[in-house]
Amino acid sequence: MSLKNIPFRVTVLSLFIFLSLLIITFMIYIQATYGKEFSQRVMNNNFNLISSKVKDNLKTLDKVNGFVIDAISSSFSDVQSIEDIEKDKDKYIKILVNILKNNEELYATYFAFSDDSFFEIINLEINKSLREQYTLSKEARWLLVYINGKNKNKRVLNVYNEKLKLIKKEEKENSYLATSRPWYIKAQNQSNILIKSKPYSFKHIDSTGMTYAKRYNENVTFALDVLLNNLNKTINGLNSMKSMNSFLFAEDKDLIGSTTKDTTLISQIKNLIDKNSVLNKKEHIYKINSEKYIINFSQLEDDIYKYLITVVSFDDVMEQYSKYFNLIVVFTILLFLFLLPLIWYFASVIVKPVLELKLESKKVKNRKYSKLRKVKSRVFEIQELSNSMLEMGHSIFEYQNKLEQKVKERTKELREKNIELERLSVTDKLTNIYNRIKLDEVILEELNRADRYNEKFGIMIIDVDYFKQVNDTYGHQVGDSTLIEISKLLQGNIRKSDTVGRWGGEEFVIICPHTDLKGLHELANHIREKIAKHSFPVIGNKTASFGITIYKEEDNLEKLINRADEALYKAKENGRNAVESI
C-alpha cells in the first residue's frame, strides 16, 4: 500500500502514536541529557576538590616544614661545627627526636656541615623495613647517624630505645658526603631561604619523599626528610570511584606521584602528557585500552609539583545515573501502554465522523445532492464542515460545468504562451535565430552524444570583419540590418541537421553533427564565399573570418569553444576573410 493510499483511521492512529512516542522519547532524551550533565558536573566538582585539596596539602606541607625549620633555628643558632653538637649531644638528640615525634610524616632530621660532618636522627617506626635494613630488634626506636668531617671514611650508628637509652653502637665504612647532595648545594646557593628537593625514592625504604633544607650560615645546613604518605592519602581519600586515579608530574613532566600501580595506565598517561595532549584543555575523554576515560588536568602553584592529572572511567561516571535512567525508561514504556486505549478512543472521535463525511462527499461526486445528510460529531469543526457541505452541495454542480470550460480555455492559452516563451528564451531578439543559451544547450547535447556513441561533430565561430566600422560609419541601425542579413545567409547555406545561432555581437556559431574536419572546412569556405559575394544594403560587400574545430576525446564545452576561438584568432591574423582550424 503506497503512502497516498493509507486509510485515514491508520493515519490518525499513527499520528497519535507518533506524538506519544515523540513525547516519551523527548522525556527520555531530557533525562539522559541532564543526567549526563549532572553526572559530569558532579565529576567536575570532584576533580576541582581533588585539585584544591592537593594544592592545600602542598601549601600546608611547605608551611609546616618551614615553620619547623624556622622554629628550631633559635635552638641551633650557636652551632657552627659538629664539635658544638658533641659538647651537648643528648640535648640535640632530644630536640631532633621531639621534632620527629610531633610530625608523623618526618622520616629524619639532620645537620650537614661544610666539612662533610653529618648528624642525623632517623625515626625507625616510619617504615617496618628500617629495622630489617639495620638488623635491629623491635626495641630499637631511634637511629643516630654520626659522621665527623675529620674522619669522613667512618660512620657511627647509635641505636636508642623509646626512652633514648643507647642499646647499640657500631661503626661502618662511609661513602656519604652531604656536601655533594642536591639539597645541600641548593640550600647553600640560597642562603636563609627554605628549599625543597624534587621527590625521590628513599634508599632504605620502599617509599617516596622529599627533603626540606635551609642554610643557617656558611658552615651549617639543617634539613628534614618528609614522606609523601599524607599527600597520597589525601589523593586516595578523595578518589570517590574505584577507577579514579591521580598522577602528579614535575615541571619537566616526570611522574613523581601516582595512586595506582597499573603500569599500562601509567604509561598511557605519561605518553599523553609527553605529547602535551592533556595540557591544552581542562578536560578530555580518551580511549585507553579500548575503555573511555575522562581525564582532568590541573596546574599546581608549586615549585616542584606542576601538574595534577586525574582520570576516571567514563562508564563508572555514568553507572549510578544509568540505574535511575533505566527506571525512567521502564516507567515511560508502561505509561505509553496505559495511554494506548485513550489514543484509540480519541482517534475514533475524529475518524468516525470523517469517514461519514467521506461517504457524503461521494454523493456530491455522483451528483446525488438530494441524499445528502448531516453528520453528527462531538468535534465542532467536523459538524460545521458537514453543514457547509450541505449548503455547498447544490452550488457545486451549478459552477462545475462553467469552471471546467474556463479551465480548458485557460489551459490552452497557457500552453500557447509557454510555447512562445520557450521560443523567445532561446531566440536572439535581433536576428531571430538561436541565442547563446540554446547554442550552449546544443553543444552539450552533442558532447554527450559524442561521448556515448563516439560520433564526430564540429563547430565554427564566424566573426564579421571590421564590423565596428559599419556602426561607426553608417550607424547602429545599418549595423543591425547587416547582422540580420548575415544570419539569413547562414540559415540558407547550412544543412538541416546543423544549428546556427548568434554567439554575441557580430559573432555567430554553427554546430555541425556527423562531420569531419574536411567536411567542416568545405562548408565554412562555401559560407565564406557566399558572404563575400553578397551585396549588403548600404554597405555593399562584407567579409567574415571563420574558426573551426572538431570534437576530440575528453573535450568539454570550454575546451571546444577555446579551440574554435584560437582558430578564429588565427584567421584574423592571416588577413581575415579566411577559414582556419585548430
Image: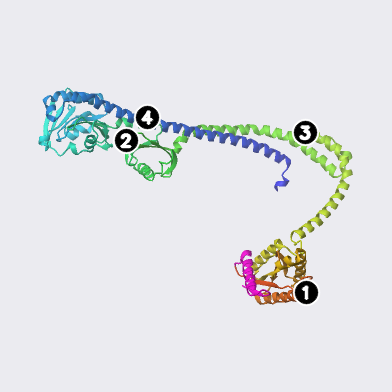
In front of the other: 393 or 444: 444
Residue picked out by circle 1: 535
Q: Earlier in the sequence, mark 2 or mark 3?
A: 2
Task: Give the number of marks.
Answer: 4
Question: Quick one: label 3, few (<14), some, or many (20+) residues within 10 Å?
Answer: few
In the displayed structure, does residue 331 sit left or right of residue 341? Answer: left
In front of the other: 555 or 319: 555
Question: Which circle marks residue 381 in the picture?
Answer: 3
For badge 4, the amino acid type reads Lys
Question: Quick one: label 2, few (<14), some, or many (20+) residues within 10 Å?
Answer: few
SS of the residue at dot 3?
A: helix
Q: Earlier in the sequence, mark 1 or mark 3?
A: 3
For badge 2, the amino acid type reads Asp
Residue 429 in picture, x, y percent from top left: 76, 61
Boundaries of the magenta span: 554-582
Q: Earlier in the sequence, mark 2 or mark 1?
A: 2
Question: Quick one: label 1, few (<14), some, or many (20+) residues within 10 Å?
Answer: few
CA gap, disc 1 and disc 3:
80 Å
Q: Earlier in the sequence, mark 4 or mark 2?
A: 4
Q: Is 101 in the magenta?
A: no
In the displayed structure, does residue 293 sit left or right of residue 555? Answer: left
Tag nearer the camera, 4 or 2: 2
Question: Which circle marks residue 53 in the picture?
Answer: 4
Residue 367 in picture, x, y percent from top left: 87, 44
